[in-house]
Every structure is written in structure tokens, then in C-alpha cells.
Image (spheres, rainbow, N blue to C red):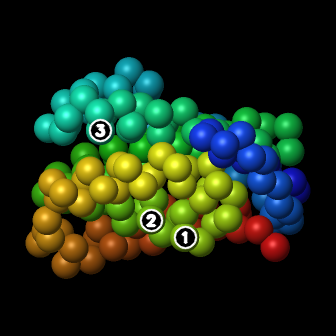
């Protein structure tokens, strides 16, 4: 199946074929655990600057097209992160965000094109305010991150 992403800064279009995407994957990407309002509230409650919050809101708007479906991939990633923060309250938002998005961007070409321009400033901002956390040693958190990574594996291109 064809995947298409557009770089929000340059307008460059990236297209690739990811043959193993089925309707169940697309359906799972269209469903969210939290409402848009709940996500906004969690972002608003972060102890970060207004610029970082603005970048996070922009990140939630990143989309890709799979076949005829428009997937809010940025929103889906933030949804996963907010769920992890709720399940693992000792973990910092920045650590989880960096772990998930960093891996996705490095391993899945279409996401790198769409999210790369938004990710760099966010990562730098979180890098300044985030330190090492004891939660890195938390095996349950590591398993959850691997589970999230696996849920995006269908987006790998040939």
C-alpha cells in the first residue's frame, strides 16, 4: 500500500510502498485513547515554555496518507505518550517522547519526512530540561515502548 507524507516546512512530498498495511492497522491508527481536549489539557499542564507547548500542538497535527486514509500520526504518538505518562507517572514526558519519536523517526522513512522538522526543536527543548531518570531502568516502561514501536511497524517501507 502507498504511504505519502508532506514535509510541513518545505512542502516536499515523500511516497513509499509499505506492502504489509491492512485495514486493522489503519483502524487502530484512527482510534485514540484520549480525546483532543484531554491531550490539550495534558500539554497545557506541562511545566515547559509556551514555545514548547506550541511545538507539541503542531506535532499533533502531523498526518500521513495511507491509501485513501488520512492518519493523524503525530496525534497518535502523543496519545501513546500521554497513556504511558499516566501508567508510569515517575517517567518524564520528555524521556518517553524522545524514546518513542526518536526511534520512529530513525526507523521509518515516511515519519522522518513528516515529523523531522517538528521533532528537532522539541527534542532540543526537552533535552535542556530533562535529565536521566530512574525510570529508564523500569522494565515495564521498556516493554511498553517496544509495544508502541511494534504498533507502528506496518509503516516500514520497502
Percent across and percent down for residue 69 are: 78, 37
The quarter of the picture where the C terminus appears is bottom right
| Furthest-top residue in this view | 37
CA distance for labels 1 and 3: 22 Å
Q: Quadrant of residue 157?
A: bottom right
Dot 2 alpha-carbon crowd within 10 angstroms: few under 14, some 14 to 19, many 20 or more? some
Q: Earlier in the sequence, mark 1 or mark 3?
A: 3
The quarter of the picture where the N terminus appears is bottom right
**Tag of residue 102:** 2
Percent across and percent down for residue 48 are: 18, 39
**SS at badge 2:** helix
Is residue 29 visible in the rendered image? The answer is: no
CA distance for labels 2 and 3: 17 Å
Q: Nearer the viewer, residue 118 or 110?
A: 118
Q: Earlier in the sequence, mark 2 or mark 3?
A: 3
- From the viewer's perspective, tell me whether residue 21 is left or right of residue 133: right
Percent across and percent down for residue 61 are: 54, 33
Dot 1 alpha-carbon crowd within 10 angstroms: few under 14, some 14 to 19, many 20 or more? few
Q: Nearer the viewer, mark 2 or mark 3?
A: 3
**SS at badge 3:** helix
**Tag of residue 106:** 1
- What residue did someone put label 3 on? 52
Residue 62 higher or lower than 14, as above or below: above
Label 1 close to label 2 by CB (< 8 Å): yes
- From the viewer's perspective, tell me whether residue 56 is left or right of residue 11: left
Q: Quadrant of residue 140?
A: bottom left
| Residue drawn at x 43%, y 26% as measured from the top left | 35
Q: Quadrant of residue 79?
A: top left
Amino acid at each position: 500500500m502507498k504511504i505519502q507524507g508532506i514535509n510541513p516546512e518545505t512542502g516536499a512530498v515523500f511516497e513509499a510502498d509499505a506492502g504489509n498495511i491492512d485495514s486493522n492497522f489503519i483502524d487502530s491508527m484512527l482510534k485514540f485513547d484520549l480525546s483532543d481536549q484531554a491531550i490539550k489539557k495534558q500539554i497545557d499542564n506541562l511545566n515547559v515554555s509556551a514555545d514548547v507547548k506550541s511545538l507539541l500542538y503542531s506535532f499533533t497535527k502531523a498526518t500521513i496518507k495511507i491509501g485513501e486514509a488520512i492518519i493523524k500520526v503525530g496525534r497518535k504518538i502523543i496519545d501513546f505518550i500521554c497513556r504511558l505518562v499516566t501508567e508510569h507517572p515517575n517517567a518524564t514526558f520528555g524521556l518517553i517522547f524522545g524514546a518513542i519519536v526518536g526511534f520512529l523517526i530513525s526507523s521509518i522513512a515516511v515519519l522522518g519526512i513528516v515529523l523531522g522538522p517538528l521533532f528537532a526543536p522539541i527534542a532540543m527543548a526537552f533535552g535542556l530540561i530533562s535529565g536521566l531518570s530512574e525510570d529508564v531502568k523500569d522494565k515495564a516502561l521498556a516493554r511498553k515502548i517496544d509495544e508502541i514501536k511494534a504498533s507502528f511497524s506496518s509503516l516500514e517501507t520497502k
